[in-house]
Amino acid sequence: METYTFLREFADSWMLLLLFCIFVGVAFWVFRPGSRKVHQDTANIPFRHEDRPAPDQEASK
């Protein structure tokens, strides 16, 4: 069997199955029940210190 033909058949069958399993695993890991708090905390990073003025604004006063 020619190398290209072998690699093509492998990619069409087992590699496709492997990549699909990896995709499902990553999707499950992202949407797992315990990750909600982590995602909410990460989403709120820009708003953490909103009540404090920036350091360069304090110096101009």
Image (spheres, rainbow, N blue to C red):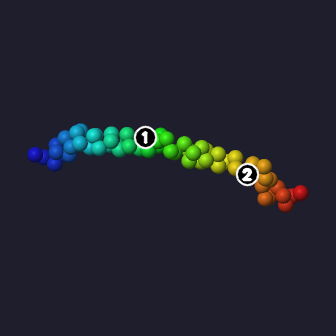
N-terminal of the two: label 2 or label 1?
Answer: 1
Q: Residue most toward the front?
A: 34
Q: In this view, does 9 lie above or below 53?
A: above
The answer to whether residue 51 shows anywhere in this view is yes
Q: In this view, does 39 lie to the left or right of 61?
A: left
Circle 2: element type? loop
Total numbered labels: 2
* Relative image position of residue 20 (x, y in whole percent): 33, 39
Residue 27: which numbered mark, if any? 1
Circle 1: element type? helix
* Relative image position of residue 28 (x, y in whole percent): 42, 41
Q: In this view, does 10 lie to the left or right of 38?
A: left
Residue in the image at 26% along x and 43% along y: 15
How many neighbours does mark 1 have within 10 angstroms: few (below 14), some (14-19), or many (20 or more)?
few
Q: Residue 19 occupies which quadrant of the picture?
A: top left
Q: Which amino acid does label 2 sit on?
A: His
Q: What residue type is labelled 1?
A: Ala
Residue in the image at 67% along x and 48% along y: 46
How many neighbours does mark 2 have within 10 angstroms: few (below 14), some (14-19), or many (20 or more)?
few
Q: Residue most toward the bottom?
A: 59
Distance of label 2 from label 1 (alpha carbons): 32 Å
Q: Residue 9 occupies which quadrant of the picture?
A: top left
Residue in the image at 29% along x and 44% along y: 18
Q: Is residue 58 above or below residue 23?
A: below
* Relative image position of residue 56 (x, y in whole percent): 80, 58
* Relative image position of residue 51 (x, y in whole percent): 78, 49
Residue 5: which numbered mark, if any? none
The answer to whether residue 8 shows anywhere in this view is no
Residue indicated by mark 2: 49
Q: In which quarter of the image is the C terminus?
A: bottom right
